[in-house]
Amino acid sequence: MNPSQINEEVICVLVFIENTDQIKVDYIEIEKGLEKQFKGLLSLFEKPKTTAKGIVQVIKKHKKLKILFERYDYCVSLNKPYQGFYSTVEEIESNYPSDFSKIDGLVKKEKAKQDEKERLLNQCKHRLQAYYLKKAYKKCARDKKILAYSHRRVGWSAPKYPLNDDFSIQLKTNFGYGSASYFYTKIKYKGLDIIPFSDWVNYRISKIYEIVQYSSKHRLNNESWQDAMEYIAKAYNLSVEHEALFVQNYIIKQGEEMIRGLRKILTNKEIKLKGYVFLNQERGYVDLKEDQHNLNEFRGEKISGALELIPYIQQFKHLIETEGYVEEIEACNIEVKPIIVEEQTNVRQVLERLNTEKDILDRRKRLLSIRLQEYQKSRASLKKAINGQNGIHDKVKLKEELNLQNSDFKKVKTELTEVAKEYRQKSLNINRHEKILENLVEYELKINDYFEEKREAEWSDLDDESNIGIDSLINSNKPFFKELVSLHYPFSKEELIKYWDNLIYGDAYYSTSLGDTDTTYQPSFGLCWNKNIDWDSWLSGKWVYFDPNDDINQNKEFPSDKLHIGFWNPFTGIMEGGAKSVPLDLGKEIKNTLHNTDKEEYFPYSGEGAFYYGTIYEKKHSRFLVKVKKTYDELSIPAVERMLKKDRMVILLNRSIWENTLQKYFTKEVLEELFMPESDS
């Protein structure tokens, strides 16, 4: 069977071979019952005097061919956008008005008429095929022997077909959506997704979220249905005949190929990869030959990205030994991390040089622009003087001077054009290197996150053997727990009055970037951020917003028995902090600012290395937000102790850790001991 006939003359199907548990690819002829009538319609298109508008009316009234103007879920081209025939009859009529009155000349009028008829004929042919396919789909759906069949429907489709208790398939298509189109087959074996792990290292551009969605992907054309069905039949038949060989070919080999690919990426300077052309159409192979920066960026992307595949590999642990694959991926990441870190230094040095060169070009560009403006003013004055000059001698002299200036003007203009072009190229180069640096930082942090989480999981296994208790933890970290309880505990008014002098009030302002000092002024947390208490007039009256610049506060002193809202900036002479009342919004503060325990490392906003540190800040902030917003189930006390050492701010700011783990320990007795030491009680 010629694959080009699929969805044109035949439907490609999967069927069971009679009296066996094997399946095969077969073909069902598409019934075409309107060929005689359509042939008669074609004769109308061939007549010189007919118009598209007239033919539309004939079709509209034809007893059988009027089905051409029904709506059809049909792709003319699987990989192009805006597919499907969804127009109403009225809309079709409006598309073929056959009005050529505004076209001059008989020849042009005739050509326009024929072009319109050709356009209608082409659409009618596709609409007829869509009608035939619609009937064929219904026939296949009714036939119990057919397991799966080809189609050319528009949009998302993912029918599932269980072939036996262990083996099911899914044909995942999204035809007719341009660059978003795809054609995948997905195999599930014994409840596990068969994943082409090797695609991660075989393609220059690949996404983990995409790879885990398919077992095999296919080119976006009708012929690919044969490849898809044969892939399924071969895999299924092998799983039935020889399970061990199926596991070897579809699971083990994929893992081994991925590991080999990671090793090549780690060590080779030139790498052979599969490539793509536009709209997901695959083309052969490409040789990746990158400069050092891009090569190390690519290494970081592929090797750190492979960490995300580990959970998908581990799902096969009851079928194969998976630990070796995991160890290889981890080893590659341990080896690539220093390469990534060193490359960040190299890229920062390049960026420093490029930015210096860009500044020089910027100064040249501005000076040349000034000179150009001066020349333009001078030339305008000379032209005016020439026009107002009566003496021939003086006029010639002025023209000579103008010609000299014109020569200089052209030189400056040419130089400015060249400098501006070089400046743009330099800016693009800077943007490219900044993106490389941003990615390198991301890959380093991804590796760090993985091994941190792994260590935490290993420690969790040992928690039952730890002797640390909550009393010991609180006593050894009293300042922290005072701040935590002040921030979250639902104090009654009586408790607030009783413990007032020992509570942690916190700072009543939001993080504020101070441009004059290149720093961010950050608050500490405590009672003024606590929304679990009743903020009556007595409590809210403990804080006051006092702006000495307000007329009402002129020559007044801040009340000594009150707490500040906001803070005074002596450099600008204004109140800062973005707050005028209590309590403050903790969610707003967390969303906008990174509260990492090691603040100084991540907070330079300008000067040398600003982009690099800004990039780290953004990456750290996004990870910090994930941890702060994460819902933690009840943690063991040893786990809290470990988190205190490395993620103190996460414990402080994550509401679920307080509610699900710590709140229950702060009884009346514990509060008394924490806020009313023996010497005070």
Image (spheres, rainbow, N blue to C red):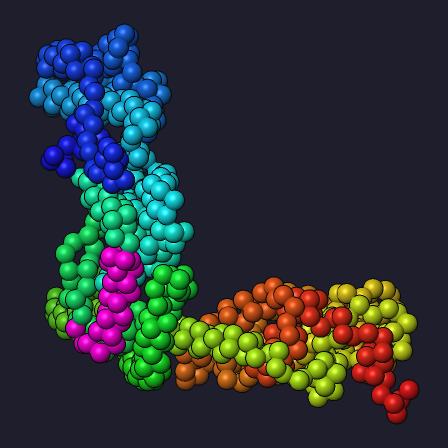
Depth check: 563 or 30 in front?
30
Q: Is residue 131 left or right of residue 503?
A: left
Q: Does the magenta stretch include residue 253?
A: yes
Q: Residue 162: percent from the left, percent from the top?
A: 37, 41
Q: Quadrant of the C terminus?
A: bottom right
Q: Is residue 251 magenta?
A: yes
Q: Quadrant of the N terminus?
A: top left
Q: Give the range drawn in magenta.
A: 244-270
The residue lying at 36 percent from left, 61 percent from top is: 319
The residue lying at 50 percent from left, 68 percent from top is: 622
The residue lying at 38 percent from left, 51 percent from top is: 190
Q: How many labels does the image show?
A: 0
The residue lying at 19 percent from left, 76 percent from top is: 268
**Up-down relation of residue 74 to residue 373 (above or below):** above
Depth check: 516 or 227 in front?
227
Which of the 4 image quarters holds residue 196? bottom left
Q: What secondary structure predominates along the stretch shown in magenta?
A: helix
**Up-down relation of residue 462 to residue 373 (above or below):** below
Judge whether residue 303 can be spotted in this image: yes
Q: Is residue 173 left or right of residue 508?
A: left
